[in-house]
Amino acid sequence: MTLSLPSDSDLCAQLALWLPEQRWFSGKSLTLSAVRLRLREPLIDTDGFAAEQVVVDVEFAVGPAQRYQIPLAYRVHPPEALLPFALPDLDVDPVPGTERPVVYDATADQEVNDHYLTALAEQQTLGSITFRTVAGSAIDTALRSRPIGAEQSNTSIVYGEQLLLKLFRRLEPGINPDLELHRALADSGCEHVAPLIGWIESELDGEPLTLAMVQEFVANAADGWSLAVNSVRDLFVEADLHAAEVGTDFAGEAQRLGEAVAHVHADLARQLGATHAAVSADTIAGMTRRLDAAAAIVPEIADRRVAAQAVFDKAATAAPTTVQRIHGDLHLGQALRAPSRWIVIDFEGEPVKTIAERRLPDSPLRDIAGMLRSFDYAGHHSLTDFSTLQDSQREFRAKEWTTRNGSAFCDGYASVAGTDPRAESDLLEAYLLDKAIYEAVYEVRHRPNWLPLPVKAITRIVG
């Protein structure tokens, strides 16, 4: 059976209708003006079945274009389970003597996922796409795949509970920091990341393009956010106990997590270098820009604009600090508790920054501040679930849990790093404030009911 694949223009028209409905598409609030094909590389072409690796640039009425990766598959009669992943049909007549297939997201197709695994195992090159593995890695091509549907920004596929392939949806020129830092940590023998197995790459406009990476799958692991939230809820239920007395007290895990993050920072410094330098003027300028932008849309920040700037100005005169490559977007959801240790994941950095910005060295205090803000969120976000407690009681319990676990995390970090991050209080406060401002903007746009949480933190920090 010969398939009549859609033309480039028809495919772009289908994608323009389909993309805004995808969870990983970050242009939902923008008016899409055009979809332009940048890469369309055949992966599979057999009787009645085809698959392609597709990269498009999405243009908007206002703002810069965004680049996305969309693996697509084509079947005339796909199994019913694949129909929810189909692109809208343009009802175009097929070329005489051929059949027009259903076009759908290929990451849902077992056969395409199997093809990725085989191409990696054989380190194939398919047109402009290259499949690479770490020296000494062995890949079992018989492993069965299953997509993970919970992610928001990428698509991950698990193979036999042994391997995890993360396909990056939004692309930018250059090596993805997630791959770059995992390669550095693999070279250092770091025990607190999942071992890197391989990656998929291409080239566009003379620049490298990271399409996907493959790691060992961390089986029987729980994410740090879920563990922390469960601990908080148990504390609220046990109204007569202090945080240290609850059976699910999290402080021991928080300390071990701090140790793990310190090991990751140390390994990154050894592999990629570190300096001891005065606080960069660019760092403070970036904080000020984000403050001004937030003040324009969050009245509570506008009211505290002068006091917030004073925090940043004070940080500008702080003593020299360590500057190196860091995680860049660290929080409890980026940590997995495996049976024997904590694993840090997702080194892509803040999604609102370009890859060039994410690759810039920064202070490890930014990661520490991100984790401390995450503890604050975990301690406070579910208060409304426990209406039987008075507001003052609930706030006391949340503050007790947050303070206890934030301190335990810093204790663990200091025990490995040899220096206590709390000793650099002026700079740490600036990073905490910068993160809380970022959170406030996010909450205004996506979860207005959560806005009081970062606003309270901002009020507390500015005094």
Image: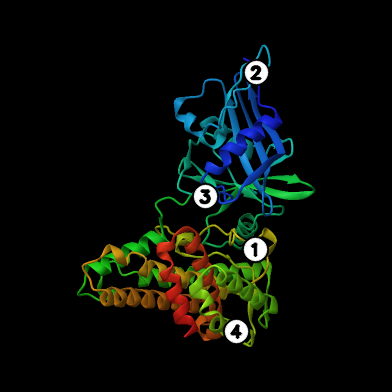
Query: Which of the labelled discs sits on residue 94, or is there none?
Result: 2
The numbered mark at residue 315 is 4
Q: Position of residue 435 (x, y in %)?
A: 53, 71
| Res 193 visible | yes
Q: Residues within 10 Å of mark 3 (few under 14, many from 20)?
A: some
Residue type at tag 1:
Arg
- Give the Cα separation between the discs numbered 2 and 1: 45 Å
**Do the CB atoms of the residues marked 2 and 4 lie less than 8 Å apart?**
no
Name the N-terminal-most of marks 1 and 4.
4
What label does residue 358 carry, if any? 1
Distance CA(mark 1)–CA(mark 4): 21 Å
| Label placed on residue 296 | none
In the image, what residue type sits under mark 2? Pro
| 279 sits left or right of 338 in the view | right
- Disc 1 element: helix
Measured as percent of width and height from the top left, residue 188 is found at 61, 63
Q: Residue at x 70, y 41 (%)?
A: 130
Disc 1 crowd, CA 10 A, few/some/many (<14, 14-19, 20+):
many
The three-letter amino acid code for the residue at tag 3 is Glu
Q: Earlier in the sequence, mark 2 or mark 1?
A: 2
| The label number, if any, that marks residue 216 in the structure image | 3
Q: Between disc 2 and disc 3, whose residue precedes?
A: 2
Of discs 4 and 3, which sits in the foreground?
A: 4
Q: CA distance from mark 2 to mark 4?
A: 65 Å
Identify the element where label 3 is drawn: strand
**Could you tell me which secondary element the residue under label 2 belongs to?**
loop
Disc 2 from disc 3: Cα separation: 43 Å
The mark nearer the N terminus, 4 or 3, is 3
